[in-house]
Image (spheres, grey):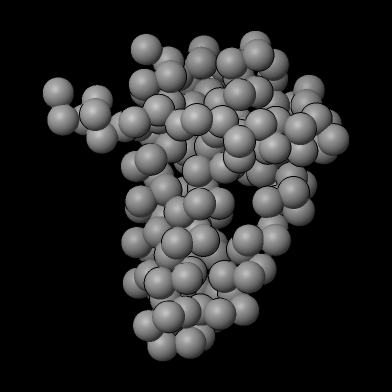
Amino acid sequence: MKTINSAMVISATAMTEATTAALLGSATMIGDEAAITAMTAGMIVALSRIHDKPLSLDDAMKWLLPNMGIFIASRAFAMSVKWIPIAGTVANASITFAATQVIGWTVFLIFKDDKELSDVGAKEVKVYKDKAEKMKKPDVHKWASK
């Protein structure tokens, strides 16, 4: 059940962030970043509660901000192209969706291994990120239609 609930939270957050990136990103160069970061922190809080490791929004931000460097390459690319009409908007939304999925599944794997986010250093986060990128993701649409 934790996997299903986590998948729903991660997918819903990724879709919401992609929509935000599409709506705000093309209008302003960095206007979507604050909203996306806050939503990502909210996703981490939701995942922490699913896995019985409750965090506050402040705790999630304290973990997320120092670890953003591990996930930043995709966001940097999104920022570099989002000013291009239509193509930039689509690229920004797509990259945001993928980056949110990776962050969400990275956090999921850390919690699944019964670890606290605060105890996982940058090198270990990178290992979890690599696993998250390669793992087969659950089919959320299959569950949502039932």
Horizontal relation, residue 97 to residue 128: left or right = left
Look at the picture and state if 140 lies above or below 146.
below
- Residue 78 visible to the viewer: yes
Question: Horizontal and vertical percent for residue 45?
Answer: 51, 32
Please give the count of numbered marks on the rendered protein.
0
Q: Quadrant of the N terminus?
A: top left
Residue situated furthest left in the rendering: 146
Please tell me which residue is depicted at 57% across the width and 70% down the height of the picture. Answer: 78
Taking the spot 42% from the left edge, 15% from the top edge, the residue there is 2
| Quarter of the image with the C terminus in it | top left
* Residue 121 position by quadrant: top right
In percent of the image, x 66 and y 68: which residue is there?
76
Q: Position of residue 20 (x, y in %)?
A: 38, 63
Residue 24 in picture, x, y percent from top left: 40, 73
Please give the name of the residue rendered at 47% of the width and 71% of the height, measured from the top-left corner: 91
Quick one: 39 or 79, which is closer to the camera? 79
Residue 80 to residue 32: above or below: below
Instruction: Decide which of 2, 95 is in the foreground and name it.
Output: 95
Percent coordinates x, y for residue 29 in the rendering: 54, 80
Question: Can you see residue 59?
Answer: no
Q: Judge from the rendering whether residue 70 lies leftward or rightward of residue 46; answer left or right.
A: right
Report whether 69 appears left or right of 37: right
